[in-house]
């Protein structure tokens, strides 16, 4: 697994974040057809973003996200230019993805 690419822009006090997680996102049905075992499915189950140690985005996800999903969200009141947005994700098999991007 490669990780998460993060871009964050601060404009008029609002931070807009766009992130892409590199992950195959295999569903139960795909794995049942491919290997005959639904338990081989692997997809992102949880993703979190923080700035200065404060959570700004937190989501539980399911198998219904696309391969290499893109997450877009915004927030205000936390962070300034030069701060870092740190994103972490966990998949069904315990694999971890992470990435960070500086606020511009």
Image: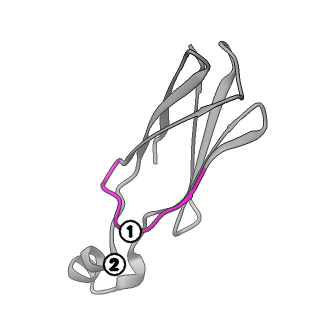
Tell me: 31 left or right of 3. Answer: left
- Label 1 sits on residue: 63
Residue at figure coordinates x 50%, y 28% from the top left: 16
Q: CA distance from mark 1 to mark 2?
A: 8 Å
| Res 40 quadrant in image | bottom left
The numbered disc on residue 35 is: none
Marks counted in the figure total 2
Secondary structure mainly formed by the magenta segment: loop
The image position of residue 24, as x and y in percent, is: 35, 56
Question: Residue 54 versus residue 24: which sits nearer the camera?
Answer: 54
Tell me: 43 left or right of 82. Answer: left
The numbered disc on residue 28 is: 2
Residue 93, compared with residue 15, is above or below; it is below
| Res 42 quadrant in image | bottom left
The image position of residue 47, as x and y in percent, is: 56, 53
Q: Is the C-beta separation of discs 1 and 2 under 8 Å?
A: yes
Residue at figure coordinates x 35%, y 59% from the top left: 65
Residue 10, compared with residue 35, is above or below; it is above
The image position of residue 94, as x and y in percent, is: 59, 65
Residue 47, compared with residue 10, is above or below; it is below
Residue extending farthest right: 53
Question: Residue 76 versus residue 90: which sits nearer the camera?
Answer: 76
Question: Residue 62 versus residue 13: which sits nearer the camera?
Answer: 13
Task: Look at the image and tell me in which quarter the C terminus lies.
Answer: top right
Q: Residues within 10 Å of mark 2 (few under 14, many from 20)?
A: some
Question: Residue 92 versus residue 101: which sits nearer the camera?
Answer: 101
Q: Residues within 10 Å of mark 1 (few under 14, many from 20)?
A: some
- The residues colored magenta run 58-68
Instruction: Kindly state the secondary structure of the residue where label 1 is placed.
Output: loop
Residue at figure coordinates x 46%, y 42% from the top left: 2
Residue at figure coordinates x 38%, y 68% from the top left: 63
């Amino acid at each position: 697994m490669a990780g998460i690419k993060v871009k964050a822009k601060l404009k008029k006090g609002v931070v807009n974040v766009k992130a892409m997680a590199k992950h195959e996102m295999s569903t139960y049905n795909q794995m049942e057809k491919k290997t005959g075992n639904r338990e081989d499915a692997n997809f992102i189950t949880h993703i979190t973003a923080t700035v200065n140690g404060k959570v700004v985005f937190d989501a539980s996800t399911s198998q219904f996200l696309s391969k290499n999903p893109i997450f877009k969200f915004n927030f205000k009141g936390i962070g300034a230019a030069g701060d870092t947005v740190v994103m972490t994700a966990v998949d069904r098999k315990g694999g971890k993805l992470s990435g960070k991007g500086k606020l511009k």
